[in-house]
Image (cartoon, grey):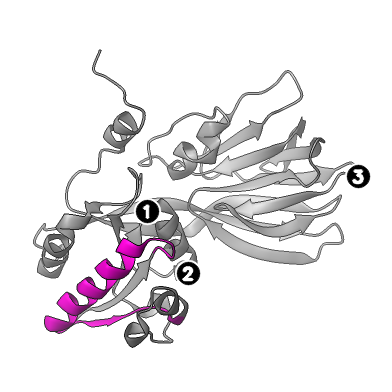
Amino acid sequence: MTDVVIMAHHERHDARALADSTAAWLRERGHEVWMLPADAATSDLGHLAVDRPVGAADLVVCLGGDGTMLRAVRLLDGAPVPLLGVNLGSLGYLTEVEVGSVTDALERFELGSEAGHWHLDERMMLSIVVTAADGTRRGTWRALNEAVVEKRVSGHTVHLLVRIDGEPFTSYAADGLIVSTPTGSTAYSMSARGPIVSPKHRALLVTPVAPHMLFDRSLVLDPNETVEIEVIGEREASVAVDGRPVCDLDAGSTVMCTPATTTARFVRFGAHHYHQVLKAKFGLTDR
C-alpha cells in the first residue's frame, strides 16, 4: 500500500474533478489518499481532507502545472518524496503526464522503479540564508528555480554587492539579481536574458535584471561556489524564493545562496528531454 497526497491547482475546476476521480481510483486499489485541508476546502473535497504533512507520503500527485509542482516542493521542505506532475494547463517544464494518462502513470508507478517502469529525475535545489546587518539570521529557505534580490521602490535601482566564495566580485546597480539553478534557467532568469542550462547540470547562475551598467552578463558558476549578495546604499530590497516574496532587506543585509543538501525528485517514465519541451514551448522548427 502506498500513501499518496494529492495537490490540486486552486483555480482550475478540472483539477477538482480529476482529484476526486484519482483519489477514488487509488482507494479502490488499497492505497491511502488524502489532501491537505486547505486544498480540500478550496476544491470542495472535504472528504479527502487530512491534517497530515506532505512529507509523510510515498508519492505526491500534483494536478496543475509548474506552479503546483513548485508549491509541492516547498511544502515537502526537503523530504525525499517523489512528485508526479499532471499537466492541466499550457505546456509545462516540470509536469510529466497529460490528463488522459493519469491512471496509466499510476499503474506504472505501482509496478516499481526496480523493474524499470519509472525512474527518478533528481534536480539540484538552492539553499538561501538571509542575515540582517547586525548578524541576526532572518530565515532560511529552499528553492527549486531561483532566489531573487530585487528593488522595493518602483523607478529606482538597488545597489547590490556580490561576493563569490567570500571574495568581492562586483557591485550591481540594477532592478535586481537572480540566483538560479539549471531548472530555474527557463524561468525568470531566461526572461532576463540568462542562459538556458540543461537541468542535468549542477551549477549556480547569477543573472542581473535590467542592469544600469556596462557589465550585464550572466555568470555560470561551479555548484561548490557560494554566492553572497549584500544590499549596499540606502535603497531597500526584498527577497523572493520561487516567485514568493519572503523577506524585506535593509542596507547591510546579506543573502547567501549555496547548493541545498537535498534534491527535488520527479517521477519519469522515460527519458525526459527538456529541450523538446523547450522546442515546443517556443515553436522552434527543425530548420
Q: Quadrant of the C terminus?
A: top left
Quarter of the view holding residue 64: bottom left
Q: Secondary structure at mark 3?
A: loop
Q: Is 213 placed left or right of 13 in the picture?
A: right
Q: Is 109 placed left or right of 232 in the picture?
A: left
Residue at 59 percent across and 42 percent down: it is 179
Is residue 82 visible from the viewing direction of this image? no
Q: Is residue 19 magenta?
A: yes
Tell me the CA gap for discs 3 and 2.
34 Å
Question: Would you name the residue on which mark 3 appears?
Answer: 234
* Residue 165 x, y percent position in the rendering: 66, 43
Residue at 62 percent across and 24 percent down: it is 217
Q: Earlier in the sequence, mark 3 or mark 2?
A: 2
Q: Earlier in the sequence, mark 1 or mark 3?
A: 1
Label 2 Cα crowd, 10 Å radius (few <14 / some 14-19 / many 20+): few
Residue at 80 percent across and 66 percent down: it is 136
Label 3 Cα crowd, 10 Å radius (few <14 / some 14-19 / many 20+): few
Tag in front: 1 or 3: 1
Residue at 24 percent across and 43 percent down: it is 272
**Three-letter amino acid code at the position of disc 3:** Glu
Question: Would you name the residue on which mark 2 appears?
Answer: 75
Quarter of the view holding residue 25: bottom left
- C-beta proximity under 8 Å, tags 3 and 2: no
* Residue 255 x, y percent position in the rendering: 70, 52
Label 1 Cα crowd, 10 Å radius (few <14 / some 14-19 / many 20+): many
Q: Earlier in the sequence, mark 1 or mark 2?
A: 1
- Give, as a single range, the part of the protein colored magenta: 9-37
Question: Would you name the residue on which mark 1 appears?
Answer: 65
**Three-letter amino acid code at the position of disc 2:** Leu
Q: Nearer the viewer, residue 91 or 231?
A: 91
* Residue 79 x, y percent position in the rendering: 42, 70
Q: Secondary structure at mark 2?
A: helix
